[in-house]
């Protein structure tokens, strides 16, 4: 039987990645690798590094701000609060904060994010 889990977000756990975004790991259980959730924050005028997640699909849910999403070689799209973006496994991606305030979004990964799945492309 799956266990019930309650997590209280700790804003002090935010860290800056080499990808140029700030992350809080909200849910990334070492005993359940089926999925993970993180909150990302990208500062104004910052573009994250081109990267992909090996064998991991990712979905973004935009909570605040506005940006410009690039996925693969041909997909570009303006994004803003309430938008959802699905990024296929093994596909290059990056996002630019085009607004005046922080761009904040949730990242849902299936299966769970692991550093071994991250591949920088710059």
Image: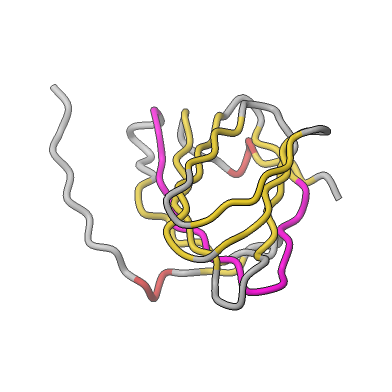
| Residue 88, picture quadrant | top right
Of 55 and 60, nearer the camera is 60
What residue appears at the point 47 percent right and 29 percent down from the top-left corner? 111
Q: Residue at x 71, y 49 (%)?
A: 94
The residue most toward the right is 122
Q: Nearer the viewer, residue 80 or 49?
A: 80
**19 versus 60 height, above or below:** below
| Image quadrant where residue 13 sits | bottom left
Q: Quadrant of residue 68?
A: bottom right
Count of number-bearing discs: 0
**In what quadrant of the picture does the N terminus appear?**
top left
Find residue 85 and report its horizontal and vertical position in percent. Answer: 54, 39
Residue 65, image x, y percentages: 52, 66
Q: Is residue 43 highlighted in magenta?
A: yes
Residue 38 location, x and y as percent? 44, 52
User: Is 73 left, or right, of 52 in this rendering?
Assistant: right
Q: Position of residue 46 (x, y in %)?
A: 71, 68
Range of magenta residues: 34-50
Q: Nearer the viewer, residue 21 or 120?
A: 21
The residue lying furthest to the top in this view is 1
Q: Work out whether residue 80 or residue 56 is closer to the camera in this orientation and state it.
A: 80
Q: Is residue 5 left or right of residue 82?
A: left
Q: Is residue 1 shown in magenta?
A: no
What colouring style does the render use?
A: secondary structure
């Amino acid at each position: 039987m799956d266990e019930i889990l309650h997590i209280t977000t700790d804003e002090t756990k935010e860290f800056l990645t080499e990808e140029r975004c700030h992350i809080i790991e909200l849910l990334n259980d070492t005993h359940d690798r089926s999925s993970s959730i993180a909150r990302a924050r990208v500062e104004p005028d910052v573009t994250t590094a081109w990267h992909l997640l090996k064998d991991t699909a990712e979905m973004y849910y935009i909570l605040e701000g506005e940006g410009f999403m690039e996925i693969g070689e041909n997909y570009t799209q303006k994004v803003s609060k309430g938008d959802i973006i699905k990024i296929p496994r093994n596909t290059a991606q990056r996002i630019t904060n085009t607004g005046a305030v922080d761009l904040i979004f949730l990242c849902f990964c299936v299966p769970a994010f692991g550093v071994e799945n991250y591949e920088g492309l710059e």
